[in-house]
């Protein structure tokens, strides 16, 4: 196993999108996005939408964080942001016309519950005013158990939120001090118990492996506590140390980070314990109880993945509001400005705040489908993929299949005329396998600083 880890542990995308963000260009702007929204509107109201709302505020900055965050507890700043969000929702709804049904809503951040109750209400009122929420909609929010108050949780549940994702990362005090995120087991468990009392389902924990000072034996204690609390779902993300791109990570001493086989051993221990406790591996780094709808969807090969994570309610398009948020509409990605001043200026002037994006080609679309299937279900049905895109997929993707031959010889993947399937061992190497289908990797443009894009390591 160590030889395979050394061989395939290399920088590579996480594939929350394809083409990945470094391929996007500033030549795609507000007018291009508006055009795509008009195309989306033409599908009519029966085609549901997914809505992502980015709330960037946090009380303080965690040293490991890779999210687009604004450190502020200012009531005035929060109030201003919500008012601009409401304007953007109006602008978005005006362009979408009668296509206003939402089957998925996700509040991410930052810490969405950094907003006070009255501001959460003002934001929700605008969503309800301009959009219709389907009866079976997945309505999710990310929370920090230390920051979130019970009153906020009860308010969110009363609004209609039914999914909850709690940031946990690691319960080890030494690790928590190193990443500037102090959170006790008791605080987390109390929040989960109250959420269940309120009727939240699909409760998820986010954990991270590869953090400073982590060791197998200490992370095992975290996993034992997690299993005792028994969330419905877990995500165990690989820590991406990219201090050039994330200056806050420069406060982490690289010498304290577990790497290579040591890092993988932490994940492997967690994976084995979760599987033996009855959880099912979902896609790349997620786990769910065997009767959870994510596990059922994976068994039936109908699991889907978007910027919000894995879902069983894929909408044809995802629209997003807030600074840095990303929309996925009618074969194009579009990202808002990240700094608040240019984001505010654009929305207040009545135009979208898009600063970059990309229109997907036919080649991008078929490769995106292939990568998504692999990341979700560990299988690519080449016959079905080809039928959807009007090609012979085995022939069309022959270059990618050839790149996978070495992984096939290493026992990580099985390739037939109709299927590409990761073996049980190969499921640990899904990102390197997905890279075989990426036609952009060798032609990504340099960053504004003249450097090539920086990706996290795949293991």
Image (cartoon, rainbow, N blue to C red):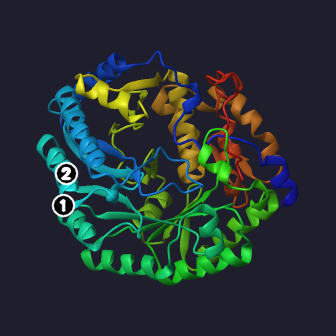
Viewer can see residue 430? no
- Residue 436 percent across, percent down from the top left: 70, 36
Tell me if label 1 and label 2 are in contact, CB under 8 Å.
yes
Q: Nearer the viewer, residue 189 or 133?
A: 189
Q: Which of the 4 image quarters holds residue 392?
A: top right
**Mark 2: which secondary structure?**
helix
Tell me what residue is drawn at x 35 percent, y 81 percent: 193
Q: Is residue 74 left or right of residue 268?
A: left
Tell me what residue is drawn at x 75 percent, y 40 percent: 404
Image height of 8 relative to 178, above or below: above
Q: Which residue is mark 2?
A: 124
Q: Which residue is mark 1?
A: 159
What crowding class fits label 2: few (fewer than 14 Cα within 10 Å), some (14-19), or many (20 or more)? some
Q: Can you say which quadrant of the picture contains the N terminus? A: bottom right
Tell me what residue is drawn at x 74 percent, y 56 percent: 253
- Residue 310 percent across, percent down from the top left: 45, 53
Q: Is residue 265 left or right of residue 105?
A: right
Q: Nearer the viewer, residue 381 or 359?
A: 359
């Amino acid at each position: 196993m160590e030889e395979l880890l050394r061989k395939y542990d290399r920088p590579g995308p996480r594939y929350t999108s394809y083409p990945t963000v470094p391929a996007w260009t500033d030549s795609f702007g507000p007018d291009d996005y508006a055009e795509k929204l008009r195309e989306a509107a033409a599908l009519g109201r029966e085609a549901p939408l997914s809505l992502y709302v980015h709330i960037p505020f946090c009380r303080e900055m965690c040293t490991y964080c890779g999210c687009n965050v604004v450190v502020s507890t200012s009531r005035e700043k929060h109030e201003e942001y919500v008012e601009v969000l409401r304007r953007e929702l109006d602008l978005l709804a005006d362009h979408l016309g009668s296509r206003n049904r939402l089957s998925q809503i996700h509040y991410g951040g930052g810490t969405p519950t950094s907003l006070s109750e009255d501001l959460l209400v003002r934001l929700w009122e605008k969503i309800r005013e301009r959009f219709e929420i389907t009866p079976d909609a997945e309505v999710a929010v990310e929370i920090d158990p230390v920051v979130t108050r019970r009153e906020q949780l009860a308010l969110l549940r009363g609004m209609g939120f039914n999914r909850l994702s709690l940031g946990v990362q690691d319960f080890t005090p030494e690790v928590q001090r190193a990443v500037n995120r102090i959170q006790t087991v008791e605080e987390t468990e109390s929040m989960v118990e109250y959420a269940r009392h309120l009727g939240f389902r699909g409760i998820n924990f986010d954990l991270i492996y590869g953090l400073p000072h982590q060791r197998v034996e200490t992370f095992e204690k975290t996993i034992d506590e997690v299993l005792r609390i028994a969330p419905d779902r877990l995500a165990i993300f690989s820590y991406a140390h990219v201090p050039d791109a994330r200056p806050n990570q420069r406060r982490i001493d690289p010498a304290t980070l577990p790497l290579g086989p040591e890092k993988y051993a932490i994940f492997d221990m967690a994976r084995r314990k979760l599987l033996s406790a009855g959880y099912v591996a979902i896609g790349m780094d997620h786990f769910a109880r065997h009767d959870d709808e994510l596990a059922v969807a994976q068994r039936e090969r109908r699991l889907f993945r978007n910027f919000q994570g894995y879902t069983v309610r894929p909408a044809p398009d995802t629209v997003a509001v807030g600074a840095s948020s990303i929309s996925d509409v009618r074969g194009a990605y579009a990202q808002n400005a990240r700094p608040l001043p240019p984001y505010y200026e654009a929305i207040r002037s009545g135009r979208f705040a898009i600063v970059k994006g990309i229109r997907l080609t036919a080649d991008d679309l078929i490769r995106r489908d292939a990568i998504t299937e692999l990341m979700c279900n560990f299988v690519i049905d080449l016959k079905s993929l080809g039928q959807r895109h009007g090609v012979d997929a085995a022939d069309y993707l022959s270059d990618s299949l050839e790149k996978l031959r070495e992984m096939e010889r290493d026992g990580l993947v099985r390739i037939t005329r109709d299927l590409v399937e990761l073996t049980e061992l190969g499921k640990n190497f899904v990102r390197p396998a997905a890279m075989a289908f990426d036609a952009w990797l060798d032609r990504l443009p340099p960053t504004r600083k003249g450097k090539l894009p920086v990706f996290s390591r795949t293991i």
